[in-house]
Image (cartoon, rainbow, N blue to C red):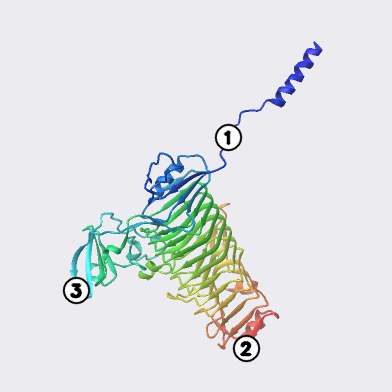
Amino acid sequence: MKWRSLLLAVLAIVLIGTWQPKIMAIPTSPSVLEVNPAHPQASDTPQDITQHPFRTIGAALAWAQNSDRPTDIYIHGGIYREALGTIQQRQTPLRLIAKAGERVILRGSQQWSDWEVVSSSPEVTIYRHPWTLGWGVSGNPWTDYGVDLPLLAQRGELVWGQDHPLRQRLRFEELQGNDFYVADAEQQLYVALPAGISPNELEVAVHREALRILDSGFISLVGLRFEHYGGTFTQAVRIERSHEIEIKDCVFWGNNWGGLESHQSDRLRVERTQFLQNGWRGMAGVHLRDFTVQQVLVQGNNWRGAWAGFYTWDAGDKYFHLRRAVFDRYRAIENQAAGLWLDTDNQEVYIRRSQFVGNAVVGLFLEAGTGPVTIEDSLIAYNYSIAPNYLQTPGIFGWAAAQVTLRHNWIWENQGAQIGVRDPSPRTITLPESGKEITVRSENWHLEGNWIGSRQERLLTTLKGEPFLQTLGLQNNHWWSEAPYPFRLEGEDVPWSQWQERYGHASDRWLTP
């Protein structure tokens, strides 16, 4: 019996060592789809995706969403007047990629050829076209905060000429050249054009969103251009509750509201991308973790807000509740709003090698945050206050912003104070991780190795800034001004000598004009 037991044990060991469970093969190489409407055999339902391309991006995307395999969709050059819908609950890699060297445009507008002439003069011709989308007025979501959102900012219709939007008017009688008006009751769209300009070349927005990414991961958009999407409080691309998202080598141009907005998402990367001439903002985000912005240009945004005289509150690139964010070589140039606004509870934010130049409200706005926020090797210059108020200063403005480091920056010739710290009242914020309420003040700023100068404007101002002044750290900064009182502290004009005596550091230098 012993030998039988021993034999069974040996057989068991042999069987265990040689038996392998059957493992289902998991595809590692992606399915490759092509979109090429110019191909003679292009179809929205090709019989053989390895041989025949899709006609539209939407059809290829629908095929990909019905597959569990990683998928690359290569898109040939052209204009795709599409709204792609939502990528939802996908966790295998999906990439939408422009073919190398080709220009792929997703456009939310249409061109119409059946305009009717309403009236004509030697200078201006007025045309009309049926308008049945009925977008109307969005309403004001901020009435509880006492914010007046003008009606012009609540409309989402968009008519674009060759290189600029036509100006929207609220009454037919206001139409001039390069204007448009929507008559809701008549369901008509009117445009007024200079003599000799054809309305057939106009782009009229009919879609309000190009793409939404929801509850998904490992999605890449590469080399795509998103333009002429309409609507209010809408973005060409919106990301929600997603992770491992890449936006690379893209352009967001001429959309009525925003280019890209992200919410409650992790590990987003925006690289070598441009946000140009959007009506409200280029980018925005809320509750983002491990967010990277690299080699991004944000320029000429908030023209619709400017039409309505609305430059602050929600206009411009704005972020809430960031955790571990890097803005590297970020350029905010000539926006009609803040260049970058970190508003409420942004932590571990690092801004480096960036430029904030010629923005109409403030270059960099730090508000209601525990920090730390570090800005280094950057240029903040020639920003101005198109809508000045008693709070904001056009260079760097801090309101209840703690743990801020400015290192090796040029803060130069902003049309107002170069650095302003003003806390009219402490700010109470709720930390989302714990639900704990904390009070934040502007304090624990450190300025090191900066060049801060203006011929006549203030170099630094404070309002209720005692915590800031008492905790300010200075080292190796260079200051320059021709004004006799370059500092204004708590309502008092202060010369350099008095500043240096009260708050200065021996290593700081005054540059004699």
For label 2, the SS is loop
Marks 1 and 3: which is nearer the front?
1
* Residue 132: mark: none
- Residue nearer the viewer, 511 or 218: 218
Q: Which circle's residue, 1 or 3, is located before the other in the chain?
A: 1
Disc 1 crowd, CA 10 A, few/some/many (<14, 14-19, 20+): few
Q: Amino acid at mark 3?
A: Ser
Where residue 74 sits: x, y (%)? 47, 50
Marks 3 and 2: which is nearer the front?
3
Where residue 372 sits: x, y (%)? 61, 63
Q: Amino acid at mark 1?
A: Ala
Give the residue number, with chain letter if any, for mark 2: 512
Give the residue number, with chain letter if any, for mark 1: 25
User: Label 1 vs label 3: CA separation?
Assistant: 72 Å
Q: Quadrant of residue 191?
A: bottom left
Give the residue number, with chain letter if any, for mark 3: 121
Q: Name the image quarter holding the C terminus.
A: bottom right
Name which residue lies at 50% across and 59% down.
249
Q: Amino acid at mark 2?
A: Thr
Where residue 233 sits: x, y (%)? 40, 58
